[in-house]
């Protein structure tokens, strides 16, 4: 071996035997990071599997392409935007910020079938107040196959 003529092997430190506290510090820093700077993609609540749009005859014929602004409203009163869960006060600010980005913006409200008309009208009024030119309510064609409705 090349190290034998210089006796380098005797001058090396022995390998460390303990695991040390560094691993616990790393886990603590990761937990702190996710608690303060939690990602909406990793730990945020989402739409449940029971989310269904109301059914309306002629919904497919009246379909219109919207801009990138879509909100989801659950029957429990939760409102989801692209930024995550918001309440009605935060939604007004979100709508104002988005309406100023483009000319004649369109908002699509995807409301679960249990959402009351009063809630939808309040959200539509807030969107019109913020400057949205059109506010659309999402619906599905009755009896339409869910897989085919998503493709069209």
Image (cartoon, rainbow, N blue to C red):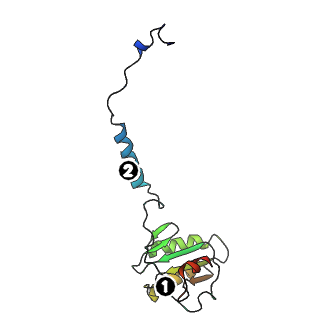
Q: Position of residue 107 (x, y in %)?
A: 58, 78
Query: Mark 2 or mark 1, which has the lower sequence index?
Result: 2
Give left or right: position of 103 versus 19. Answer: right
Rounded to the nearest whole Å, what is the CA distance between mark 2 and mark 1?
38 Å
Asked if 53 appears above or below 3 in the picture, the reply is below
Q: Position of residue 89 (x, y in %)?
A: 45, 74
Q: Nearer the viewer, residue 88 or 13?
A: 13
Disc 2 crowd, CA 10 A, few/some/many (<14, 14-19, 20+)? few
Viewer-side label of 2, 1:
2
Place residue 44 in its image quadrant. bottom left
- Residue 135 visible in rendering: yes
Disc 1 crowd, CA 10 A, few/some/many (<14, 14-19, 20+)? some
**Residue at 63 percent of width and 69 percent of height:** 101
Quarter of the rendering occupied by the C terminus: bottom right
**Residue at 53 percent of width and 83 percent of height:** 124
**Residue at 40 percent of width and 12 percent of height:** 10
**Residue at 48 percent of width and 61 percent of height:** 41
Element marked by disc 2: helix
The residue labelled by disc 1 is 120
- Residue 131 visible in rendering: no
Q: Nearer the viewer, residue 68 or 133?
A: 68
Give left or right: position of 84 versus 104. Answer: left
């Amino acid at each position: 071996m090349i190290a034998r003529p210089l006796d380098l092997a005797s001058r090396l430190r022995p390998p460390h035997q303990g695991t040390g506290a560094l691993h616990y510090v790393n886990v603590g820093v990761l937990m702190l990071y996710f608690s303060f700077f939690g990602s909406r993609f990793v730990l945020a609540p989402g739409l449940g599997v029971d989310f269904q749009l109301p059914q309306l005859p002629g919904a497919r014929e009246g379909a219109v392409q919207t801009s990138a602004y879509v909100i989801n409203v659950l029957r429990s009163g939760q409102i989801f935007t692209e930024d995550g869960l918001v309440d009605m006060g935060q939604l007004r600010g979100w709508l104002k910020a988005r309406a100023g980005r483009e000319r004649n913006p369109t908002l699509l409200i995807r409301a679960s079938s249990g959402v009351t008309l009063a809630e939808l009208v309040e959200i539509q009024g807030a969107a019109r107040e913020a400057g949205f030119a059109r506010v659309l309510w999402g619906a599905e064609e009755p009896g339409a196959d869910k897989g085919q409705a998503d493709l069209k």
